[in-house]
Image: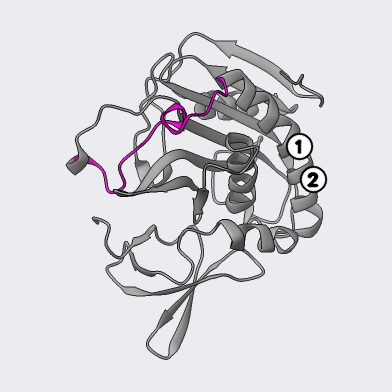
Amino acid sequence: MRRLELPWDVEVLQTIDSTSSELMRQAKLGLTAPKILLSLEQTQGRGRRGNHWSSHPSDSLTFSMGLMLNPDNWLGLSPCVGIDLAKTMDPHQHLGLQLKWPNDVWVHTVEGHRKLAGILIETINPSSSPCEATSQARYCVIGVGVNLNTPNMRPESVSIAPMGLWALGSTLSGLDIVIEMANKLWFTLKCFEAEGFLPFKPVFDGLDALIHQPIHLSDGSTGLCLGTNHLGELMLLQGEDTRTINSLEVSVRPLAAKT
């Protein structure tokens, strides 16, 4: 097992409402040094658009990473983090993991796509309350949830059924994932801060689960996914027009998936 190579402060808890919420609370108190917060259980874990992420000891991995960042543009950060998470979960790239823009790790099975992991990115000005990201330096909290065992959930209760990483034959432990992710992400975040999404676009294109697929958006519209542009925005072909979607506007699903 590799060691943590970079200057992250690490805190491990037995249980907490949300690791991301706790890092945000600490940032409001002025504690903004690079930090990883890992909890064996989350009672109020959060996903995008208010979704709940359940977390139980030994079945899932939940952790958050926080540090100050000052990119010119925050668009594209979640896909960049997703690249590192997919590579961390599948270091030899034999599991066929894919990225669902902007923030999920999927695997394609004979039953269709299954969700292995999700990412939630939030930012805060430590001197004020949370709000939308701007071009100013902010404390960035990256929350990660990974299914290790397949959750016992009714298929009709979710749009994309979950699956556990271990069900694919992976032998990675939760600690392996945290350490490798932390080592990768430090350099990714610094590169993103300096250069934005563009250097990561070719890699994301190769992992994109939606590219060239018909998809529907949460606003009810549909179209053909053309992949991402240089900023990390989704490009959607609707008739003869191309629509640009950013991660703050909508969620997307393959056309065959439930809304």
Looking at the picture, which amino acid does disc 1 mark? Answer: Trp
Looking at the picture, which amino acid does disc 2 mark? Answer: Lys
Let me know if residue 75 appears in the view: no
Q: Say if the magenta span includes residue 160.
A: yes
Residue 189 in the image: above or below residue 218: above
Numbered mark located on residue 190 in the image: 2
Callout 2 secondary element: helix
Q: Position of residue 170 (x, y in %)?
A: 52, 28
Q: Name the residue: 73% across, 37% down.
A: 184
Numbered mark located on residue 245 in the image: none
Q: Main secondary structure of the magenta part?
A: loop
Q: In which quarter of the image is residue 172?
A: top right
Q: Give the range drawn in magenta.
A: 157-173
Q: Give neighbour class at mark 2: few <14, some 14-19, many 20+ (Cα, 10 Å).
A: some
Callout 1 secondary element: helix
Q: Name the residue: 37% across, 88% down.
A: 239
The residue labelled by disc 1 is 186
Residue 49 in the image: above or below residue 185: below
Tell how many labels: 2
State yes or no: discs 2 and 1 in contact (Cβ < 8 Å). Answer: yes
Q: Name the residue: 72% across, 64% down.
A: 198
Q: Name the residue: 46% across, 72% down.
A: 212
Q: Nearer the viewer, residue 113 or 117?
A: 113
Q: Distance between the residues labelled 2 and 1?
A: 6 Å
Q: Residue furthest bottom?
A: 240
Q: Give the quarter of the figure containing the N terminus.
A: top right
